[in-house]
Image (spheres, rainbow, N blue to C red):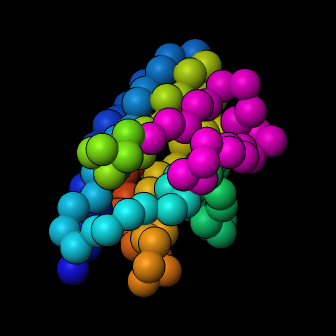
Amino acid sequence: QVQLVVSGGGLVQAGGSLRLSCAASGNIFRTNKMGWYRQAPGQQRELVARLTRGGMANYADSVKGRFTISRDDAKNTVYLQMNSLKPEDTAVYYCNIDLAITAKSYWGQGTQVTVSS
């Protein structure tokens, strides 16, 4: 069994910063892709950023240049540094981790990010 614990959401003014963390624990041999998604009210969940084990990252166009995804494989943790936040970044943010060997994908609990104007 694998557990993902997400932390770091909250309320911030436009232009501010937040850092999200997602730590995986349990029966993990090795992680592959690690990523962040978000879902705003009335909208579908969308990819924010994703990072392969080899270091290749891709970002949604809306966050390029403002958000940075990183990972610490020794801690099975993925981070999302969010700078220059905008009200349109307001959403529930979810982490997603793909495991090697089993190829199973796991989701963390959502964390609310609210950006006030």
Question: Residue visible at 48% across and 21% down?
Answer: 17
19 up-or-down from 91: above or below: above
Question: Residue visible at 80% across and 42% down?
Answer: 61
Q: Which part of the image, by quadrant, shows the N terminus?
A: bottom left
Q: At which x and y percent is residue 88?
A: 65, 39
Q: Which is nearer the eye, 52 or 90? A: 52
82 up-or-down from 102: above or below: above
84 up-or-down from 71: above or below: above
Question: Residue visible at 32% across and 37% down?
Answer: 8
Q: At which x and y percent is residue 9?
A: 35, 39
Is residue 69 on the magenta stretch? Answer: yes
Q: Residue furthest top?
A: 15
- Going by the image, does 10 lie left or right of 54? left
Q: Is residue 89 visible?
A: yes
- Going by the image, does 7 lie left or right of 57? left
Q: Which part of the image, by quadrant, shows the C terminus?
A: top right
Q: Residue furthest right?
A: 61
Question: Residue visible at 50% across and 36% down?
Answer: 70
Q: Which is nearer the eye, 88 or 49? A: 49
Span highlighted in magenta in the image: 51-71
Is residue 47 on the magenta stretch? Answer: no
Q: At which x and y percent is residue 104?
A: 45, 81
69 up-or-down from 46: above or below: above
- Going by the image, does 31 lie left or right of 49? left
